[in-house]
Amino acid sequence: MSQFENLQLDQQLCFALYSATNSITRLYRSLLDDYDLTYPQYLVLLVLWEKDNVAIKEVMKRLKLDSGTLSPIIKRLQNAGLVEKVRTDKDERIVRLMLTDKSRQLEPAIAKVQDKVACQTGLSSSEFFELLDRLNQLASSLNQKEAKQSAAS
């Protein structure tokens, strides 16, 4: 038995976040199955529903994914008829993602999925948005520290 209280599993912020993330992702997965969507595909669609016709590099940046991870997700979305890849006339190296009519029609149903997940958290609306804000602050703070450490090395 460890003599360090800070080494107890229940004292770990990382484990609490990991456990909560797993639980919420499982809930999304079960609800998204009805629409033949995976959770990562849902995230890509969220980016595009927020702003359509986005460069793939921007999607990678928003979702903090590399091209090796994002490419198969996009391929499956294309095969399902939910997104199209287009090259820009100005610079053919830039590939953009666009929603299809099918994915636009899917958006209202997926908005209901998100509402169900939010309800399942058991948080009030104000608690939900307070937690979301705190987690975004945490991520931002950690990302800034990581960027400073990378620049220093």
Image (cartoon, rainbow, N blue to C red):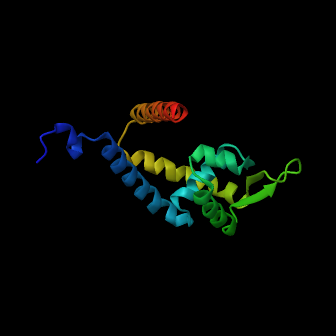
Tell me where residue 135 appears, x and y as whole percent: 43, 35
Residue, x 20% and y 44% (percent of image)? 8
Residue, x 50% and y 65% (percent of image)? 33
In front here: 126 or 132? 132
Residue, x 74% and y 54% (percent of image)? 98
Say whether residue 40 is visible. Answer: yes
Tell me where residue 21 appears, x and y as whole percent: 40, 49
**Quarter-wise, where is residue 85 in the image?**
bottom right
In front here: 146 or 153? 153
Residue found farthest to the bottom = 79
Say whether residue 49 is visible. Answer: no
Tell me where residue 75 appears, x and y as whole percent: 66, 65
Q: Is residue 140 left or right of residue 41?
A: left
In front here: 60 or 133? 60
Residue, x 12% and y 40% (percent of image)? 3
In front here: 87 or 34? 87
Numbered disc total? 0
Tell me where residue 55 appears, x and y as whole percent: 73, 48
Q: Is residue 54 left or right of residue 129?
A: right
Q: Is residue 57 left or right of residue 142?
A: right
Q: Is residue 77 left or right of residue 37?
A: right
Residue found farthest to the front = 153
